[in-house]
Amino acid sequence: MVESAPPTAANPGPQSLDTTRFMAGDLCAYLESYLDPDQIKEVYRAYLFGAEAHEGQTRQSGEPYIFHPLAVAKTMAEMRMDHKSIIAAILHDVMEDTHIGKARIIEEFGEDVAELVDGVSKLTHLKFRSKAEAQAENFRKMMLAITRDLRVILVKLADRLHNMRTLGALRPDKGRRVARETLDIYAPIAQRLGMNAIRRELELLGFAAHYPARYRVLEATVKKSRGHRKEVMQKIETAICGRMEEVGIEARIVGREKNLYSIYRKMKQKRLSFAEVYDVFAIRIIVTDVDTCYRALGVAHNLYKPVPGRFKDYIAIPKANGYQSLHTVLFGPHGIPIEVQIRTEEMDRVAETGIAAHWLYKAGDRHSATAQDRAREWLKGVLEIQQAAGNSMEFLENVKVDLFPEEVYIFTPQGDIMELPKGATVVDFAYAVHSDVGNTCVAAKIDRRLAPLSTPLESGRTVQIITAPGARPNPAWMNFVATGKARTAIRHYLKNLQQDEAVSLGRRLLEKALSIYELSLEQVPEERLRDLLEESRLTDINALLADVGLGNRMAALVARRLAVAEDSEATESLAASLCRPLAVKGTEGMVLSFAKCCNPIPGDPIVGVMSTGRGLVVHREYCRNVVDYRAKPDKWITVEWAQDSTQEYAANVRIQTANKRGVLASLATNIADMGSNIENVSFDERDGHATAITFTLSVRNRKHLADIMRRLRRIPEVLRITRAKN
C-alpha cells in the first residue's frame, strides 16, 4: 500500500474518494489538537488501508462502507483516545468483512492494533446452532478481549453507537433485534463502566427503535410537562444561583432532564404513572472541590426543605462504576419535588465519560484512575465467571445478572465497604468476599444478629459470615442468589459434584453388570479397557463411568463389551442380570433422583429408569410414566430399597374434610405428633360443605405413612384420605 501524507487544506487527499476525503480530513484536523504529526500520519495510512480493503462494499443505506469506520473513529477521537485506538476503530471491520487477516494487520500496524481489531471482530468462521448461541459466543470473546485491554470495549461501544444512529436503514425486525441487544447488553455495560453520555444515547436510540409507539407517547408527555415546569425550574435555578453568590460559593448550575428510557423503565418497574415520577427534571450544581460540595448541600437545604430519606452520599461511598456525587430531593415551590445533584468538575467529567476519562484527561487524575480501577475489578470478576461457566450461553446469562444499575453498600466487620447489586443476599456477599468463603458459609450475622443466608441485604448493614470447613454449597441457594459470581461458583461446584456422583453410580452399575460374567472392573484386562475407551473417544475410565452413571451408556452393554462374551449362555446370563436388583439408599445424590410423578418411598415396589444426562430416576413400579419403558429393557433396571435406608422421602396425601373451624390445625398437630413435617399444602374446595386438602409430607417409609393416615382417619371431620400422585 502506498504511504501518503494526511489530508490538509493544501493536500485534500486522493480524488477518487471525494465524499470520504472530507471525513478523513475532518478526523485528522480534529486529531491535531492532541496527537503528534507522526501519529496522525499513521492514522491516515490506516484510513487508506481500510478504504482499499472495503472498496466496493456499501452499507444498507447505500453509502460507501468506509463511512462507518470513520464515524467510529470520530467518536473515539472525541474521547481523545490514543492513535492506536483510532487506527483500530478505522480497521475494526476489516478482519470480519474482508479477506485481510490478523497477520497482515500485525505486519502493517503492529501487535497492539491487531489485538484490538481481533477483540472487536465477530466469530464469522464458526457455525452456531442458533443466533442466540452466536451472540453469546461473540459476547464471550469480546469480554475476554476487554479483560486484556479496556480499549476494546470503547471501540465496540463507539461502533454500536454509530450503528444505532443509522438503524433506520435496516429492516424493522432486524432493527428491533439490534435495539433489544443494545438495551440488554451494551447500554448496561456503558453504565457499568461509568460512560453515561454514551449510555444515555444508546438507551434513547434503542428505546425509539424497539418501542416506537411508547417512545412517541412518552416524548409528547415530557414535552408537555416541560412547558408547565420550565418557569418553576428557572425560578429554582435563579434562587440557588443567588444564594450561592451570597455565601461566596463559585458554582455552575445546569438543568437536567431525565432520559426517556430511564423514565419508562422507572414507570414500568415501580408501576408509576408519569405524574408520579418526580425526578424527570433535576438541577446539577458543579463546584470546584469536595469540601464545597458539602457546603453547597447545606445552602440548598437551607433554601428549600429536603425530602426525608432521599439524601445519598456517593462521594463518600462511590458507585461501583466510580460515579461520585451528592444526591438530594428538595420540596420546591408549590410542593414540587426537585432532585439536586452536587459534584466537582472532575466528578462531572468522570460521570460522563467513565473509564474513557483516563485517556481524555491523562493519567494522574485521581477520579479517572478510580473509575478505571473499578472497571478492572469488575472485569476481574467477569473473568472468574468465564472460567467457571460451562458454556457461552451460561456466561452471557451470568454477566447480564451483574449489569445492575443500582447497588447496595455493605460493611465487613473490619469496616471495609463492598458493593453488591440491589437484591443481593448474604450468600452473594460471602462469594463477593472470596469463593472459598461462599463455598463454606453456614450462617451469617447482620449487625451482630444471626440471619438466614437468603436474607436480602440493605445498604449500611455490617455482615459477618460464619464458615465451617466441611460445609458445601446448597443447590437451593440458586433460588435466591443475585450475582453472577455466586451463581457461577455454585453451578461450578454442583457440576463437579454431579460428575463425582455419576462416576460413583456408574461404578456400582458396571460392577453389577460385570458380576454376571464373574468379573470385577479391576479384573478386566487393561488393553481391553483401553480399546473400549478409544472406540468411545473417551479420555479415561472416569469419563466412561460418568457416562454410565448419567445414563448416556448402558452398563449391561459396556459390561458385555469388556467381558467379550458372545456365547448364548452369557447372553442368557446377561438377561438374568437385569433381574438382580440394585440397592437404593436415597443418599446417592444428584445422579439418582426420585420421580415427582409418583413419589416412591421405602416399601413401595420400585423400578429404575436410565435418563440421559440425569442418571437413574426411581419410579413406583406401576407408575404410568414407566409403562413405555417396559418394552425397552435396555432403558430400565430393577432396583430395591436398601435395608439401612434412614432418609426421609416426600409423599402426597389427599384428605377430604368437612368445612369446620380448626380442622387444618387439628390435621397439622396430628401429623407433627407422628414425627412428620409438612412440606407443602394445597387446597381445592369442592363445595360449601367439604374441602379437599393435599399435604406433601416427609416420611421414613411406607409403614410410617400408613401410621400417619390411620391416625388422621380418627379425626371426626376427615371424610376420606388417600395417597395421591402429583
Image: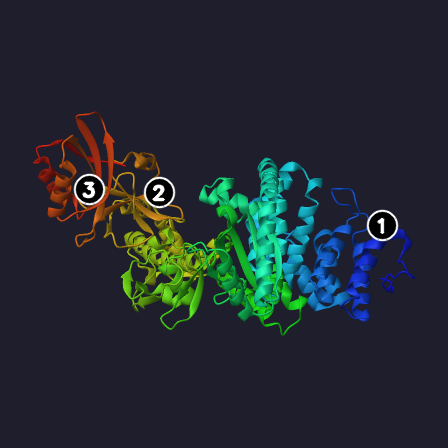
Counting from the top left corner in percent of width and height, residue 580 is at 24, 47
Mark 1 lies on residue: 19
Mark seen at residue 635: 2
Tell me if residue 690 can be seen. Answer: yes
Counting from the top left corner in percent of width and height, residue 366 is at 58, 72
Question: Which quadrant of the figure has residue 215?
Answer: top right
Where disc 1 sits, the SS reads: helix
Q: Earlier in the sequence, mark 3 or mark 1?
A: 1
Tell me if residue 257 can be seen. Answer: no
Badge nearest the viewer, 2 or 3: 3
Counting from the top left corner in percent of width and height, residue 632 is at 35, 38
Quadrant in which the N terminus is drawn = bottom right
Where disc 2 sits, the SS reads: helix
Q: Amino acid at mark 3?
A: Asp
Q: Earlier in the sequence, mark 2 or mark 3?
A: 3
Quadrant in which the C terminus is drawn = top left
Q: Amino acid at mark 1?
A: Thr
- How far apart marks 3 and 1 lie (CA) works out to 82 Å
Query: Considering depth in this image, is 58 or 407 the residue closer to the camera?
Result: 407
Query: Considering depth in this image, is 663 or 341 the residue closer to the camera?
Result: 341
Q: Amino acid at mark 2?
A: Lys
- How far apart marks 2 and 1 lie (CA) works out to 69 Å
Mark 3 lies on residue: 604
Counting from the top left corner in percent of width and height, residue 247 is at 56, 66
For mark 3, does the 10 Å Cα neighbourhood hold few (<14), some (14 to 19), or many (20 or more) residues? some
Mark seen at residue 50: none
For mark 1, does the 10 Å Cα neighbourhood hold few (<14), some (14 to 19), or many (20 or more) residues? few
Question: Which quadrant of the figure has residue 358?
Answer: bottom right
Query: Considering depth in this image, is 199 or 377 the residue closer to the camera?
Result: 199
Where disc 3 sits, the SS reads: loop
